[in-house]
Amino acid sequence: MTTSPFSQPPTPGSFDPDHPERTVVRISDPGTLISAVPALLGFHPHRSLVAVCFTGTGVGAVMRHDLELGDGDRIAPPMDLVLAQFAGVADREGADRVLVLMIDDRLPARPHPTDLARHRLLVDEFSNLLWRSDIELGQVLVCPRIVAGAPWWDLGGGHGGTLPDPGSSEVAVAQVVGGRAIRASRNEIEALVAPAAPAVRDRIADRIDDARERRVQATALNRAAADRTTVERAGLDTVLARIAQLEAGDEPDGPATAELALALEITAVRDAVLALALGEQADAAEQLWIHLARVLPDPERAEPLALLGYSAYARGDGPLAGVALGAALAADPCHGLAALLDRALQAGIRPTSLRELAELGHDIAGDLGIALPPMTPLPSGGV
């Protein structure tokens, strides 16, 4: 699956005056750029096709997909769609040129041209797609892995070199200083939201069923309990209270988890807490979404996963957003919010375009008489 684009800073230790939140760094040669890719993506890619867009001297969108090689003189069928998607994002970015990097540990230490024939097929197809949008295909680089001392080659020019330490790259330093994690692999991201043991989720499922039955009975006995505004306000109060408790170190128990699952099923509540992604409680809210994503059964876990996907998207963490939204759609293929966000992510839509969702959530909470923390600006880049 692709990692949707995010803008990275294009002189060490300086700042972009137009975007003071960005640290500006210099990428001086292919080896330095390759070593910066884990920081650009947020994780160390393995067997990956990476495309880096350039506009002028600045690095723009960075995209990744699993590297699949076809047989003989044909590229693997999924890669047709991937390359078209990459070209579409580059066009929307207004890119002048695109650099391609292929990370493939299956290559021999000294690859012969025939070892790279299937890699060239992908490059030729991508070049044709870019040409239609008047975008130049820049260098095509290949390396077995992104670690200090690993070899790299220029597929077109034939020259190469060895990689500097990825952890010491200026981009990596800028990312860590900015609070952005660089994970060892995509698997590490997936493990973050991996479901808990079946027995744990089954117990929560039983509690959800019991809580839902009690709600139906309460609604039948008490007309006030059926009032929509009352239900929505109570649900939002529940979620906000649990976030505050988690922030204080108190993780929700089984009954509280079931209560949260039912609260997030209320559309107004789910939409209102989208606003938390841009406020002071963003980190605590994300931790709650992660906890719920792990312990809730399907399809209930789709709600916190969609919320986590939006929050990660909003702060520029495309890899986590992609994993969360993919898991949400696996839990509930018809989940509207997750599908909407996933399409936006895959199309390279910038986080700034998503602010309206948070603003809407803020308005919903206000209409319910609940004041949420003030919203902060979204990053000017993408994901």
Image (cartoon, rainbow, N blue to C red):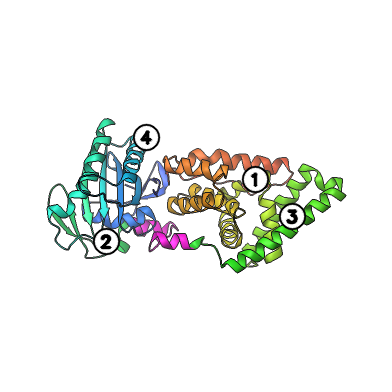
Q: Earlier in the sequence, mark 2 or mark 4?
A: 4
Q: Amino acid at mark 1?
A: Ala
In the image, residue 289 sits, relative to residue 126, either above or below, namely: below
Query: Which residue in the structure is indicated by mark 1?
Result: 272
Residue 363, percent across and down? 66, 40
Question: What range is drawn magenta here?
Answer: 171-191
Residue hosting label 2: 145
Q: Earlier in the sequence, mark 1 or mark 3?
A: 3
The local secondary structure at tag 3 comes to: helix
Circle 4 crowding by C-alpha within 10 Å: few under 14, some 14–19, many from 20 = few
Q: Main secondary structure of the magenta part?
A: helix
Instruction: Residue under label 4, please give it.
Output: 92
x then y, percent, for residue 347: 42, 39
Amino acid found under the numbered disc labelled 2 = Arg
Q: Residue at x 26, y 40 (%)?
A: 126
**103 or 249, nearer to the observer:** 103
| Residue beneath disc 3 | 212
Q: Quadrant of residue 364?
A: top right
Q: Earlier in the sequence, mark 4 or mark 1?
A: 4
